[in-house]
Image: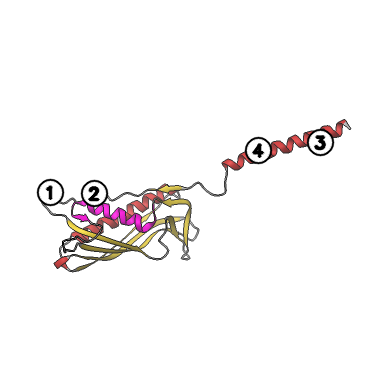
Amino acid sequence: MFRFRSNTFTLTCFLAIAFALTACSGLTQSDRPALKVWWLQPVSGAPRADDSSTAVPVILDLKVVPGLDSNQVLALSSDAQLIPYAGARWADYLPELVASLINRSLQASGHFAVLQERTRNGASACELRLELTEFFADLDSGGRTRGVSVDIGGHFRCGASGTRELGSRAYVGVDAEQMNAIVAAFQKALDQVTLDLIHQMNTKQ
């Protein structure tokens, strides 16, 4: 009788300890990766306007193609699937994020004064209408990241200068299958595209 009770007590203690360890590990381990929010910055190094020049007022209207209106960091597979990187998010949804970055880059160049709406004195600001058609990483057939692609096109309408077609695409390779390397490639590609757009807007027709 005593032996039976002793075995029962031992088994009960073992199960209690096992349950406690399982409960503790469940607080620190999960199949879902921890969420990381990634930040991008306006381009630096754009040619600055001299102090005597007048900044051109500009209103930006930026749209994205279907599939890119997301705050997820996306990759395009070799069989045309848009796949989000697990646990990785941008600081905002892509239309708002990229519009903010381009606005601040234009403003920082000194060539343009970004407005939120038309001026009230009857004069119209120049219009910069853009569409973001690519903003994703490129995956090979094995699912590894090869590079990052950013593509923006549209037009710039400004007074007597008429309408100017704009467009720029950048592809930046990725050497390491790490999220910080992939985000750095996005930053570099967006910098290249933004600088190219500013150059096209400043070029005289």
Please state which of the two labelled residues, at mark 4 or mark 2, is closer to the viewer.
4
**Residue at which label 4 appears:** 21
Q: Earlier in the sequence, mark 4 or mark 2?
A: 4
**Residue at which label 3 appears:** 8
- Region rendered in magenta: 92-114
Please state which of the two labelled residues, at mark 3 or mark 2, is closer to the viewer.
3
How far is mark 1 from mark 2, CA to CA?
A: 17 Å
Element type at mark 2: loop
Q: Is residue 55 above or below residue 30?
A: below
Q: Quadrant of residue 98?
A: bottom left
Instruction: Give the residue type that dot 3 points to.
Output: Thr
**Residue at which label 2 appears:** 45
**Residue at which label 1 appears:** 51
How far is mark 1 from mark 4, CA to CA?
A: 67 Å
Q: Nearer the viewer, residue 140 or 35?
A: 35
How far is mark 4 from mark 2, CA to CA?
A: 55 Å
Q: Earlier in the sequence, mark 3 or mark 2?
A: 3
Query: Do the residues bearing badges 1 and 4 touch, measured as CB atoms within 8 Å?
Result: no
Crowd rating for badge 1 (residues with CA inside 10 Å; few <14, some 14–19, many 20+): few
